[in-house]
Amino acid sequence: MRKNDAMSYYLGDVRAALSLLSRLPLPQGQHRGAAAAWAYPLAGTIIGGLAGLIGLVALWCGLPSPLAALAALAAQIIVTGAMHEDGLADSADGLWGGWTRARRLEIMKDSHIGAFGVIALILSLLARWAALWLLFQMDGGWAWAALVTAAAVSRASLPAVMHVLPHARDAGLSHSTGRPDVRICIGAAGLATLIALALVGWSVFGVLIWALLATLAIMWIAKKKIGGQTGDILGATQQLVEIAVLLSIVV
């Protein structure tokens, strides 16, 4: 493969990852489905970088750290179209609102939000806001690095969940994307580790440990309650791993 062809190939995967995980206006191109999952951490880096930049601008404009954190959080939600938050809410409603596998999947597919979903959203948003508040209060540059790290590492967990767990239903976004192979999962994990190491230094060890624990916990719950993963489970994974990473950096 020639150098220019290889560059176009990799950039196409990054664009595909951003098209899937964000609402950024990007030109349509060839999507390779799960084969492009290695680029999810890069998509997270861009998403987190943009959100963190908004927070820094708010801080430089004189806003206190709680409002700078709120601006960064709002920017992240806008850039992603709240797709991960939606997955978290649907997962909370389904996993704890139904008594059978079929009923849980039915609830998760329903567009209405229930009490479990509302509570999950409130707690997750408060956790992310509080962590960012503390980080911006410490240092704006450190907060930006932490936000980018959390965004990259949390999205690197998605290929692993997609590979290990079978599809819980025969349709949906996760099913249409496919299941990445082991090389894709290792590539995503390695890329996220390098990004985290460059941004937060030796704190990367705590970041990776807590990210792994959060991912394993979600996988265990999803396997036990619905027998696999869906797009909603992936969204919930991203949210909870991001919270775990942010809190580990705060500590």
Image: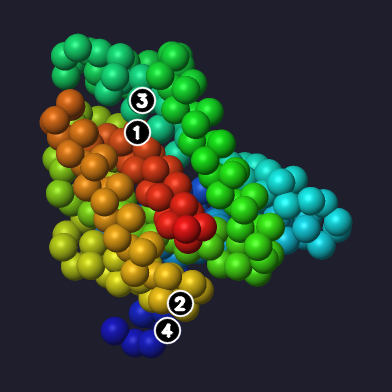
Label 2: which residue?
201
Residue 117: image location, x then y, percent: 43, 22
**Residue 48 visible to an observer of this rendering:** yes
Judged from this view, the residue extending furthest toward the bottom is: 3
Between the C-alphas of marks 1 and 4, the distance is: 37 Å
Give the residue type at disc 2: Gly
Between the C-alphas of marks 1 and 2, the distance is: 32 Å
User: Which sits earlier in the primary sequence, circle 1 or circle 4?
Assistant: 4
The image quadrant that residue 67 belongs to is top right
Which of label 4 and label 2 is nearer to you?
2
Looking at the rendered image, the quarter that the N terminus falls into is: bottom left
User: Which sits earlier in the primary sequence, circle 1 or circle 2?
Assistant: 2
Residue 112: image location, x then y, percent: 45, 14
Label 4: which residue?
4
Residue drawn where x is 56% and y is 36% of the image:
126
Between the C-alphas of marks 4 and 2, the distance is: 33 Å
SS for dot 4: helix
